[in-house]
C-alpha cells in the first residue's frame, strides 16, 4: 500500500491527454520517485515510474507499447497490442508481460514464438496444445532468461496472446 498513491498518480498522468507529463514525488523516507506519462490518451500511451535506486516499471497501452520488448522479442505479426508492463531493477534484472490479439490460430502463434526463441539461442522447455486449442510454449537461454507464450482462442475468431519475458 506504500506505493498506491504513486500508482494512482501515474494512472492520472497517463490519462491527462498531454503528449508528455512528468512529476517527482519525495517519499516519507526521503527517496524520490519520478512518474512520467507519454501519449495523447489513456488507450495509447505509457506511464513510467522510476526510483532513485534505479528501479523502473512502465505501463503501456496501444500499438506503441509493444515496441522495444526485452530480449528483442517482437510483437506477433499483425497483432493488436492491448497493453504491456515492463520493468527493470537497478541491477538490470527485469521483464515484461504483453497482451495482444490476433486472428491467427493459437498453434500458429506458439510456433512463431518458438522460432523467435530459437533465433535467440533459447532452448524449449515446454510446448503443448490443450483442450480448446490453447497453445503454450516456454524457453530459456543459458543466462536463465525466459520467454513464455500462451495463446488462447477467443470470441469473434480472435486469439489472445500473452507473453511473459524475464531478463537477468
Image (cartoon, grey):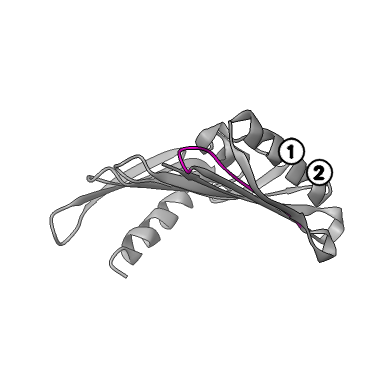
Q: Is residue 147 left or right of residue 137?
A: left
Q: Nearer the viewer, residue 163 or 66?
A: 163
In this rendered view, identify the residue nearer to me: 149 or 32.
149
Q: Residue at x 78, y 53 (%)?
A: 159
Residue at mark 1: 112
Residue 30, above or below 119: below
Residue visible at 83% across and 59% down?
Answer: 133
Residue 145 in view: yes
The image quadrant that residue 30 belongs to is: bottom left
* Crowding at mark 1 (Cα within 10 Å: few <14, some 14-19, many 20+): some
Q: Position of residue 22 (x, y in %)?
A: 33, 43
Which secondary structure, mark 2?
Answer: helix
Place of residue 160 in the rendered image (x, y in percent of width and height, measured from the top left)? 73, 54
User: Is the C-beta separation of discs 2 and 1 under 8 Å?
Assistant: yes
**Residue reaching furthest to the top:** 119
Span colored in magenta: 135-144
Q: Which mark is residue 108?
A: 2
Outermost residue, left direction? 30
Residue farthest to the right?
Answer: 157
- Residue 76 on the magenta segment: no
Judge by depth and name the residue closer to the eye, 144 or 109: 144
Q: Is residue 42 left or right of residue 119?
A: left
Name the spot of residue 107 as percent of width and height, x first. 81, 48
For the C terminus, the quadrant is top left
Magenta stretch, main secondary structure, is: strand
Q: Residue at x 42, y 38 (%)?
A: 20
Point out residue 111 in the picture as x, y percentages from the top left corner: 76, 41
Mark yes or no: residue 68 visible.
Answer: no
| Residue drawn at point x = 61 percent, y = 40 percent | 123
Amino acid at each position: 500500500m506504500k506505493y498506491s498513491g504513486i500508482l494512482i498518480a501515474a494512472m492520472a498522468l497517463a490519462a491527462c491527454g498531454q503528449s508528455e507529463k512528468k512529476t517527482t514525488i519525495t517519499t516519507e523516507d526521503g527517496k524520490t520517485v519520478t512518474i512520467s506519462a507519454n501519449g495523447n490518451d489513456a488507450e495509447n500511451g505509457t506511464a513510467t515510474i522510476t526510483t532513485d535506486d534505479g528501479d523502473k516499471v512502465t505501463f503501456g497501452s496501444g500499438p506503441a507499447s509493444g515496441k522495444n520488448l526485452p530480449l528483442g522479442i517482437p510483437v506477433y505479426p499483425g497483432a493488436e497490442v492491448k497493453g504491456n508492463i515492463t520493468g527493470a531493477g537497478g541491477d538490470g534484472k527485469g521483464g515484461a508481460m504483453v497482451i495482444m490479439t490476433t486472428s491467427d490460430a493459437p498453434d500458429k502463434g506458439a510456433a512463431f514464438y518458438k522460432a523467435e526463441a530459437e533465433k535467440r539461442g533459447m532452448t524449449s522447455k515446454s510446448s503443448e496444445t490443450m483442450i480448446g486449442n490453447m497453445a503454450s510454449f516456454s524457453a530459456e537461454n543459458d543466462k536463465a532468461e525466459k520467454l513464455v507464450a500462451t495463446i488462447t482462442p477467443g470470441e469473434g475468431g480472435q486469439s489472445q496472446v500473452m507473453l511473459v519475458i524475464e531478463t537477468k
